[in-house]
Amino acid sequence: MIVAEAKPIKEILEMIDGFNKILVVGCKGCVTVCNVGGAKEVAILASAIRIAKKKKGKDVEVGEITLERQCDPEYIEELRNIVQNYEAIVSLACGVGPQFISERYPEIRVFPGVNTRFMGGAIEHGVWAERCAGCGQCVIHYFGGMCPIARCSKSLMNGPCGGSNHGKCEVSPEIDCIWDKIVRKMMAQGRLDELLKIRPPKSWLTARDGGPRKMVREELVK
Amino acid sequence: MTEYKSGSNLEKVLKAGHFAFTGECGPPRGANVEAVRKKAQHLKGCVDAVNVTDNQTAVVRMSSWSACLILKEEGLDPNFQMVCRDRNRLAMQSDILGVSAHGIKNMLCLSGDHQRFGDHPEAKNVYDIDSIQLISMVKKMRDEGKFLNGEQIDVPPKLFIGAACNPFAEPLEFRVYRLAKKIEAGADFIQTQCIYNMDRFREFMKRVVDMGLHEKCYILAGITPLKSVGMARYMATQVPGMEVPEELIKRLKGAGKGKAAEEGIKIAVEQIQELREMEGVAGVHLMAIEWEHRVPEIAKLAGMLPRPKVE
């Protein structure tokens, strides 16, 4: 899933300073799963905005709604009859959501309420870790099922570098050296010969480096 | 006539069968040409080639190729270091052509320290290709006369290709294989990370020799003299994959106040003498960090002088 984290309330309040009719829009997708942008978090942020605005003596109207998904125009459409009641929207979806909303309703100001961090998953309760860099050409099967593009600080295809330190990355003891794991797993599986192959330079054409991406599936296009 | 890959002084010395002795020069944090010339004067006549670091520890400095040119003017044989952190394949290939055009004949291919350590931790990291891919790219450019994309080069670069190796980094059992990969990719010579634990290095070299890697590539053992107990502790605790045996720290401490540096030099000299006798070791790479002025003394004490002249 896409993992996001809440923006500091101070930053959100600064964004919406001057707006008194605000709609907080949640998303039932990834951000609900990572506890940052579902109905619950929408309610919490809406209350925080009300309290903060009240403290400043402002009379505000803060609406709450949580859409099925913000990355799908059909769900964004559900805002059609509500948006005109507001001056600003704070979206708690990943970076896709606020953009879809502002594309659909160009007359209203849209602000991001979360910082989108990465594609990953929960490794334990309350802890999420990156797993995929979205490079557009998956190669994890060469690396014991682990992605060095996303998980090695240097995206090495022929690691580990000399900075591997007791299973940790030279960048931080908080980061696992993925190449340490790749080597140990593949050697344990008797796949040293595969590790000895020199992996050629990667084409980044399918990654973000090739420019903004778009995917068309003809059979689905009406 | 011997067929040379680049005809650098380092290549000639190694091919002639001499025990090579290389040094290092960290460029200044500015356009201070005199600082480079001064370091060059200390190294001149004492070493066969001089590595010029490329924004080492991810701190901005005068570019490696530019300091290499100054060293060349001073009559030294520069070893141009290039890391994968800051350049994509376009910039790398153009710099490779550029250094060769200016008569630089050695190049060391490295991954590079991650920018989060350095003075611009907010920088975007590049790592378009990795160090092993860089080695193959330089080899392809030199031997096939082709760019990475397969297109023909109009006058290919002539470079003696180097790579690094850290025998002490984990996972230990894989290190010799990674060295083998670098050699297969096209490394002509290897300069290792600095060695303090000679027993472990000896074991490593035994595996290197058993696999016959020393016959495919010249292996230069890295030595960094310890200037103080503090430096030894720093090396032991702060530098990944570095092990400084407790007995070395004891020796430095035991030397007494103000004498640790002398003891550090003594240790380095003993190491060089030991490495000279070690099977598979073709030379020593002396990384006297900000201690270039002590290199002549170390070279002399270690019996490395005079340096051979190969025509």
Image: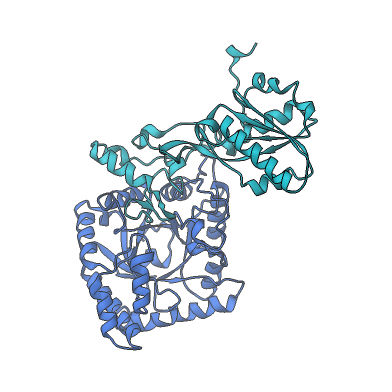
Chain colours: A cyan, B blue
Q: Residue at x 34, y 73 (%)?
A: B232
Instruction: Answer whether residue B104 is visible to the viewer in this image.
Output: no
Q: Residue at x 73, y 31 (%)?
A: A102
Image height check: is B302 above or below A219?
below
Locate residue A93, reporting x and y percent.
Answer: 61, 33
- Quick check: A75 left or right of B20? right
Answer with the quarter of the image where residue A15 lies. top right
Image height check: is B301 above or below A112?
below
- Quick check: B163 left or right of B174? right
Locate residue B148, reporting x and y percent.
Answer: 50, 43
Number of numbered labels in the structure image = 0
Answer with the quarter of the image where residue A222 lies. top right
Looking at the image, which is closer to me, B115 or B129? B115
- Quick check: A149 left or right of A58? left
Answer with the quarter of the image where residue A43 lies. top right
Locate residue B120, reporting x and y percent.
Answer: 57, 60
Image height check: is B187 above or below B80?
above
Locate residue B289, reporting x and y percent.
Answer: 43, 73
Looking at the image, which is closer to me, A211 or B148? A211
Image height check: is B298 above or below B283?
below
Instruction: Answer whether residue A146 is visible to the viewer in this image.
Output: yes
